[in-house]
Image (spheres, rainbow, N blue to C red):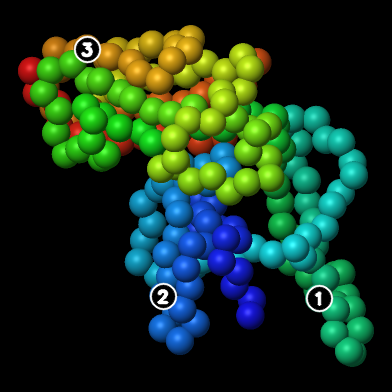
Amino acid sequence: DFVEVGGAALLDDEIVRIDAFDPATLSGTLARGCVDTVPASHAAGARLWFLDDETALDPTEYAPSVTVQARLLTQTGEGQLDPALAPVDSLLTAQRQGRPYPPGLFKIGGASYPASVAGDVVLTWTHRDRLLQADQLIDTAQGSIGPESGTTYSARLLRADTQAVLASQTGIAGTTATLSTTYVGDVIAELWSVRDGLDSHQRWRHTFAHAI
């Protein structure tokens, strides 16, 4: 009764959509990388938090990079928890609500998460739109939506051992980029959205073995 198919859940820092759930077996199907998150690796036993409409709102407008603290007070028939006994949760404001959504359906050489790539590294993705998706849980596997006006994409290749930049492109308006490097070894490909000087809250990041 507490799990709604089509609703949202939080798996570590990734927002997912509940596509199916069996309470008898505690198994289900999740759609990955919703809202402003991208699919990520999760350890076995990672806790899944089911989200519902039990929310609270602070109308205060905070500047970026401000630490906001809050206490959640449980309410029972015996009364409300003493605020002094409640743990303090802290949040550093980062303009998350105004950042562009990260691109979806990220692929390298036409494949999802390839173990190796030879030659040029061809990245492809789909558009996302923070405004058009405001009332929808769109997963990463769906086609292009938008993009939000003014959105561009940035991509780069890094050496996995030193994090040195091997190749990069910025200001990409379309949904593909080709990055070239002569480096042989483990490489990290990154892709993210940019709008009005703000990067997407999360970015795609995948490590693979590169050969010429």
Q: Could you tell me if residue 61 is visible in this image?
A: yes
The location of residue 104, given as percent across then percent down, is 44, 35
Please determine whether, in this image, residue 186 is positioned above or below residue 168.
Answer: below
Q: What percent of the width, then of the height, locates residue 12?
A: 50, 56
Q: Amino acid at mark 3?
A: Ser
Q: Residues within 10 Å of mark 2 (few under 14, many from 20)?
A: few
Residue at numbered disc 2: 27
Query: Image point 47% across, 68% down: which residue?
Result: 20
Image quadrant containing the C terminus: top left
Q: Which mark is residue 74?
A: 1
Secondary structure beneath disc 3? Answer: loop
Which label's residue is closer to the chain start, 2 or 3? 2
Q: Quadrant of residue 2?
A: bottom right
Query: Image check: 171 left or right of 123?
Result: right
In the rendered structure, find residue 180 and report the number of the disc placed on it: 3
Distance Cα–Cα, label 2 vs label 3: 43 Å
Q: Position of residue 184 (x, y in %)?
A: 11, 22
Which amino acid type is shown beneath numbered disc 1? Thr
Q: Which of these two is toward me, 70 or 17?
A: 17
